[in-house]
Image (cartoon, helix red, strand yellow):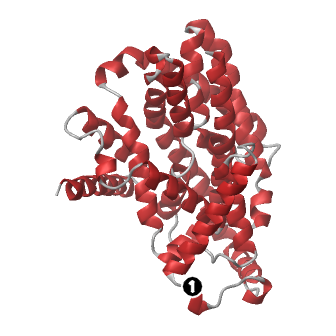
Amino acid sequence: MAYIIAFFTVMVFMLLGEWVSSLTHAYIPSVFITAILFMVGFWTVLPKNIALQASYGTQFSSICVTLLLVHLGTLMSLKELLAQWKAVCIALLGVLGTLALTLSVGTMIFNWQTVVAAVPPLTGGLVSALLMTSGLKAQGVTTLVALPVSMFVIHSVVGYPLTAVLLKKEGRRLKHEFNTNGAKVTTTKAATTAAPATQYPLHMPEKFQTPAFIMARVALIGLLSNWVASLMNGAINANVICLIFGVIAHQVGFLEDNALTKAGVFHWLMYGLLAYVFSQLSVTTPSLMGTIIVQIIVLIALGLIGMFLASWLLAKPFGMTWYMAYSCSLTALFGFPADFILTNEVASQVADNDGQKQYLLDHMMPKMLVGGFATVSVASVIIASIFLKLI
């Protein structure tokens, strides 16, 4: 019975987050509310292993990440992915802006070890927090272990709502653009999507597109991606290869559009991954947060200012609004799946119909996903590895 109670609790937290997001028209994102509920719960009555009790353990989360990243490849064409090189540049240069300001001004205020331990999660969200925590434990630097995860918790309080506000501003601009040129957009979109299925050499007949067969093919691509990553000794992160191979498999017709949604398991996997992510908040305590809150807030402020300056300077040369450019950079704070959820929630709230929503997603989602992958899946691993050697 304990397992059912744990699962029910996790789902209620997810539900409350979605309700608040809907009532506030995405100004307060669901992931933010759910994260707060988990954190307060861990400080009061929740068992520390509630995610594991609900079946969302480490192995399940690894499966979720692999399958969902391959799935995201089925949402984009190779042409669209390559077209987002500007978003990649802005996201990475935004990270450099964060590093520049925190390592210069930050080290004038706090000691070197504090800054080095706390900053990586600002450039890679949970991925960096987990890498830094594990690395600090391995090095025996126990006094700094709480800093990375605490940074992740607190910057999320700022990062999620700030990104939601910026995306809503971009969404309203795109909505006006769609209303002005809607007929032209619809015609162009129809023309580009009307190609027959025979253009894909490995296109599967409809009778083979069963949930089990779709999941088996997605898992096969995930397996192949991880195998290739192991052959390369991690030179390219396995998560990045999953995305790339997912795009390729979709392009040749081996995987359907929106594969896991068609298989009926997308939300199950997404909720499982989120539950595991939020379970990492169990290492924090009110007293611990109170002792390090000032240095974390100051470093967050410096990091966000550095990120904003880089994004603002690059927005016009790269043909984006400053709020879209800043949103791309802010994906470094949380990455996938939060970038996907935030963008989808904002598009749903801003749009008045399916046509508008699709137009918003077509313009915002690829930038946010690719920006998140560039920072969280690639840059964060490199930065955390380097910073661990600097302590």
Can you name the residue that lies furthest to the right here? 317
Answer yes or no: is residue 30 visible: no
Where does residue 14 sit, x and y in percent of width and height?
Answer: 34, 54
Q: Which residue is mark 1?
A: 209
Q: Is residue 8 left or right of residue 31?
A: left
For residue 151, side relative to residue 119 (left or right) = left
At label 1, the amino acid type is Gln
Label 1's element? loop
The quadrant of the image that shows the C terminus is top right
Tell me where residue 248 sits by quadrant: bottom right
At which x and y percent is residue 270?
46, 59
Q: Nearer the viewer, residue 227 or 287?
A: 227
Q: Considering depth in this image, is 28 or 282 the residue closer to the camera?
A: 282
Residue at the spot x=54%, y=37% of the render? 125
Q: Is residue 301 above or below residue 78?
A: above
Q: Nearer the viewer, residue 196 or 135?
A: 135
* Residue located at (55% from left, 50% from top): 336
Q: Is residue 354 above or below residue 101?
A: below
Q: Residue furthest left?
A: 1
Q: Nearer the viewer, residue 326 or 49?
A: 49
Question: What residue sits 57% from the left and 13% below the top?
Answer: 113
Image quarter (top left, top right, bottom left or bottom right) of the N terminus = bottom left
Q: Position of residue 12 (x, y in %)?
A: 27, 55
x, y (%) of residue 370? Answer: 68, 52
Please tell me whether residue 382 is drawn above or below residue 49 in the rendered image.
Answer: above
Left or right: where does residue 368 sit relative to residue 310?
left
